[in-house]
Image (spheres, rainbow, N blue to C red):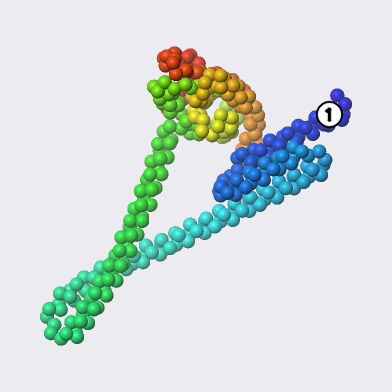
Amino acid sequence: MSDLDRVAQQLQLVSGGYVNAIQAMADYPVVVDPEQAAELKDHLLKMRAQLERASQPEDYGAVQSNLRGELRLYRDQTAALLEQLRRDARGAETVLQSLSAAVIANGVDYEKRLEADIKALAGVQALEDLGQIRQVVRGAVEGINESWRQLNRANQLVIAQLHDEIRALHRQMDRDRHAQITDNVSGAWNRERLNQRIDDNLGRGDTFCLVLAAITNFANISASVSPIVMERTLQALVKRIHGVAGADAMVGRWSESEFGVLLEAEAAHGLWMSGKISRALSSRYSIQEDGVARTVILIVDTSLIDHHRSSDPQKFRDKLAGFSKPALPA
């Protein structure tokens, strides 16, 4: 190989890495405003196309300059939006605290005033002067109206606070339910949830496939990296599976070193997808730890277990039992 060929090959490798980096930026942005994120993705994909057409040094320089500018703009826009959200939250908190304090401070006073106004009306029967009666009645009506408004404000505040408590309770219940059916390391569904979906499919007689992706060097990797790097690597692996199989694909952690991907597809498509998943996952993973990039190389083998609507469900379960490893401990 001549020096010129070697330089061309190196340039191709660097350019390919640059293209993949831009694609990753477009695929996995930090989304605060969906419209801004969509605009960023559109611009990044255009830059990727520009980079793929680049042939001169100035072409690469233009892409680099545009990329830095685009990322800087997105950072500034996102920071401004987050700051606005913080200001809005602080403003809402201040208003709520002010209203709450006012109601608490005035509530007892208005209750006492309401009692006094009612007593005044009760004493009207002892008066004989019509003008005095009218004055007492007018003052009592105004006082009762004002007391009613303040007590109504207090009730509305209590109801709003109760609604907030109910929403917070629902969110906590949702988090608790989600924690029971997901793997807290990888973020994928757990084996129990995946088994439930498999049983549902078998019960309905659906045609589907299960791809089991086994990390064959899991023990060596987990012994050589920190727990946080291992956790982030598994999370990145799950994202890659979704990148191949689709965001709606059901991905679950089947065992310590296995992940299951449930596909609503015939065996031929499942076999093709199994190969794609294996190639996508058997690769390098760049994982950040304390600001330093760690490289993790995973070796992943995939197996396919398919079920046709006319097949015996027990045969699928038997094949699955022969392929898979024990589940993670609860």
Who's the residue at 64% across and 41% down the image?
25
* Residue 269 percent coordinates (x, y): 56, 22
Residue at image x 42%, y 40%? Answer: 175
Q: Residue at x 62, y 37 (%)?
A: 288
Q: Is residue 156 above or below residue 252?
A: below
**Residue wearing tag 1:** 6
Compared with 310, 4 (above or below) is below
Residue under the point 21% across and 80% down: 136
Is 131 left or right of 312, judged from the image as shown?
left
Q: Is residue 124 left or right of residue 257?
A: left
Indicate the quadrant containing the C terminus: top left, top right, bottom left or bottom right.
top left
Label 1: which secondary element? helix
Foreground: 316 or 110? 316
**In which quadrant is the N terminus drawn?**
top right
Q: Is residue 217 visible?
A: no
Residue kind at label 1, given as amino acid type: Arg
Q: Nearer the viewer, residue 149 or 190?
A: 149
Looking at the image, can residue 275 be seen? Answer: yes
Within-10-Å neighbours for mark 1: few <14, some 14–19, many 20+:
few
